[in-house]
């Protein structure tokens, strides 16, 4: 996996975790609006929930795909033979 692919996957894991946590926050608010007894969440609580969700996915991703230790590049060279004619 190249460094670019790794960074893209890392970002996707963070966004996925935050989205899941955001969905949970919306579900709690919807349950409260429907009359269920749930705690009231404010913006600070939402921020904490999003950070925990993103962090959980971040660390799960790092466990599965550690930081690449080296970047492999492929260099292709070609030689041309030039024949002189007299």
Image (tube, helix red, strand yellow):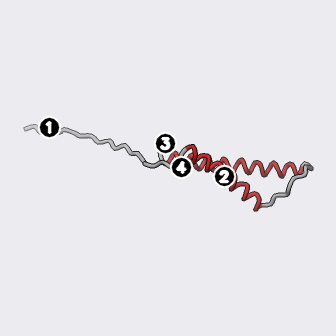
User: Reading the chain from its start, which is encountered first: label 4 or label 1?
Assistant: 4
First in sequence, mark 4 or 2: give its number.
4
Residue most extreme to the front: 63
Instruction: Name the disc covering residue 61, or none.
Output: none
- Give the mark nearest the N terminus, 1 or 2: 2
How many C-alpha atoms fall within 10 Å of the one at disc 3: few (<14), some, or many (≥20)? few
Q: Are marks 4 and 3 in contact (CB under 8 Å)?
A: no
Disc number at residue 83?
A: 1
Q: Earlier in the sequence, mark 2 or mark 3?
A: 3
Taking 33 as reference, is 63 left or right? left
Is 59 left or right of 77, judged from the image as shown? right
Q: Which residue is mark 2?
A: 54
Q: Residue furthest right?
A: 35
Task: Please tell me the numbered disc located at residue 7.
Answer: 4
Q: Residue at x 71, y 54 (%)?
A: 50
The quarter of the rendered structure image containing the C terminus is: top left
* Gap between marks 4 and 2 measured at Cα: 15 Å
Where residue 47 sits: x, y (%)? Answer: 72, 59
Q: CA distance from mark 4 to mark 1?
A: 48 Å
Instruction: Single out the mark in the foreground, 1 or 2.
Output: 2
Mark 4 / mark 3, whichever is N-terminal: 3
Q: Earlier in the sequence, mark 1 or mark 3?
A: 3
């Amino acid at each position: 996996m190249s460094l670019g692919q790794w960074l893209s996957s890392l970002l996707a894991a963070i966004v996925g975790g935050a989205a899941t946590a955001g969905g949970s926050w919306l579900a709690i608010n919807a349950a409260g609006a429907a009359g269920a007894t749930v705690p009231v969440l404010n913006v600070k609580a939402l921020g904490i929930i999003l950070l925990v969700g993103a962090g959980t996915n971040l660390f799960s991703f790092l466990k599965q795909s550690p930081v690449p230790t080296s970047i492999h590049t492929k260099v292709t060279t070609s030689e041309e033979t030039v024949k002189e004619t007299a």
